[in-house]
Image (cartoon, rainbow, N blue to C red):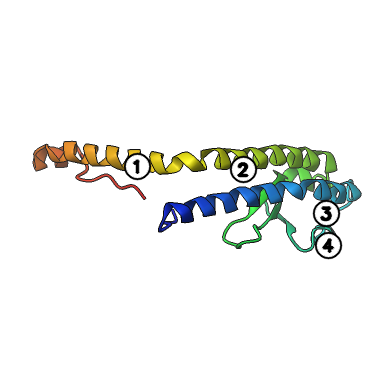
Amino acid sequence: MRFYGSIEDANKAAQTRANAYRNAAGYINTVAKVVKQFDGKVYNCRLDKALKEATEGRVFCNKNQYLFEIYTYPESHYSFHIGLANIKAEDLTEGKRIPADKIIKSLQEHREMLLRKAYDIESHIGEMEQVRAYIMQTKEKLENYCRSFNTDLRDIYRIPYCVRID
């Protein structure tokens, strides 16, 4: 978990994350058009190149033995990627043909999920300071209660001396 020095920094980071999800959802229509062009064709690096070209190098695809995924990175940093679509690798490898209908269905599901995540973040930003204060207050009460027991009892019953929240 990343620590932010002030609530303003945390709020800014949360808004940046919501914007990243919203921006990622904005690529869905472009990606769907590219995937349609490759429907039924054999999967190879041309799909990845076409996605990069259509999105100015912002969207990529990757396939491993379990999963085929289309994803992007937020513009602010590359510390995590945002999935735009994924299907089981076995769905792609049946004749090694690209099943555009399955990928487009996944794209649509991911768009809804990304927009919902952005909305959830934005709708809860204002209350996070109170939530954190409540958690810290409850943590202190719980620690005081746990410390009231004899050390032997705490050891036997594995009752923590302090509660770790990070």
Q: Is residue 67 visible?
A: no
| CA distance for labels 3 and 2 | 32 Å
What residue did someone put label 3 on? 43
What residue did someone put label 1 on? 133
| CA distance for labels 3 and 4 | 17 Å
Residue 161 in the image: x percent, y percent?
19, 45
Q: Nearer the viewer, mark 3 or mark 2?
A: 2
Residue 160 in the image: x percent, y percent?
22, 43
Q: Amino acid at mark 2?
A: Ala
What residue did someone put label 2 on? 118
Q: Nearer the viewer, mark 1 or mark 2?
A: 1
User: SS of the residue at dot 4?
Assistant: helix
In the image, 61 versus 138, the foreground residue is 138
Asked if disc 3 and disc 1 are in contact, CB closer than 8 Å, the reply is no
Q: Nearer the viewer, mark 1 or mark 4?
A: 1
Asked if disc 3 and disc 4 are in contact, CB closer than 8 Å, the reply is no
Residue at point 41% right, 55% down?
Answer: 6
User: SS of the residue at dot 2?
Assistant: helix
